[in-house]
Amino acid sequence: MTSAGRPLPAVTEINRPYWTSGAEGIFRLQQCPDCARLIHPPALRCQYDHATPQWVELSGRGTVESWTVNHHPFYPGFPTPYVIAFVNPVEDSRVRVLTNLVDVDPDEISAGMPVRVTFEAGDDGDPSEVVWFPLFTAEC
Ligand SMILES: [Zn+2]
C-alpha cells in the first residue's frame, strides 16, 4: 500500500485512533464524557469543561458544511483537481472535520449534502504504522 503521494500525518498518542480506526472500517472521534460534545481535532481536554475525552465509534455519516476545489498541484503524485471540505458528523453538527470529498463531481456538491466516510490507506513503507485517511463520499 502506498499513500499515492498523499502526505502522511504525524501520528501521536493523542490522535492515533483518528488515523488508524479505518483499519476496522470505523470512524471514531473524541467525545467529552461531561458535556457530550464531539471534539476534533483530537485534544487532551474538552475546551469547555476540561474533562478528559473518550474515543467513540460514530456512524461515519455527515453533511458538507463548506468546500473548495483545489486545482494547484501542491504535491507530486496527488492529482488535481481535488475537493477540500469541512464535514459535520451527524452525531454533532458543531464539529468540523477537515477532509477530502472523493468520487464526487465538484459541480454536484452542495451545502448540507449527505456524505459518508470512506478510508484510504497510506504508509511510508513501515507496515506497522498504516494510516487510514478518513475521506468522505456522497451517500447513496
Ligand atoms: Zn465537555
Image: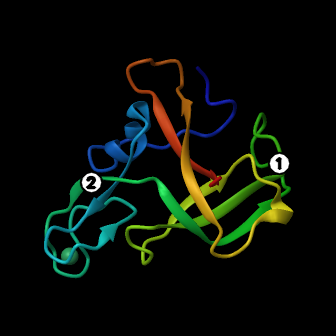
Q: Secondary structure at mark 1?
A: loop
Neighbourhood count class around disc 1 (C-alpha, 10 Å): few under 14, some 14–19, many 20 upward: few
- Viewer-proximal residue, 62 or 35? 62
In the picture shown, does residue 133 fall above or below 85?
above
- Mark 1 or 2, nearer chain start: 2
Neighbourhood count class around disc 2 (C-alpha, 10 Å): few under 14, some 14–19, many 20 upward: some
- Viewer-proximal residue, 60 or 120? 60
Question: Is 78 left, or right, of 43 in this rendering?
Answer: right
Which residue in the protein does label 2 denote?
Answer: 56
What kind of residue is marked 1?
Pro
Q: Position of residue 30 (x, y in %)?
A: 29, 59
What kind of residue is marked 2?
Val
Residue at 13%, 74% in the rendered image: 34
Q: Report the mark closest to the observer, 1 or 2.
A: 2
Residue at 82%, 48% in the rendered image: 73
Q: Secondary structure at mark 2?
A: strand
Q: Position of residue 126 (x, y in %)?
A: 46, 19
**Which disc is residue 73 wearing?**
1
Q: CA distance from mark 1 to mark 2?
A: 35 Å
- Viewer-proximal residue, 41 or 139? 139
Q: Name the colour scheme.
A: rainbow
Question: Is 27 left, or right, of 46 in this rendering?
Answer: right
Determine if the C-beta at disc 2 is less than 8 A from ligand 1.
Answer: no
Ligand 1's quadrant: bottom left
The quadrant of the image that shows the N terminus is: top right
Residue at 58%, 48% in the rendered image: 135
The reply to whether the C-beta atoms of the residues labelled 1 and 2 are less than 8 Å apart is no
The extreme front residue here reads: 140
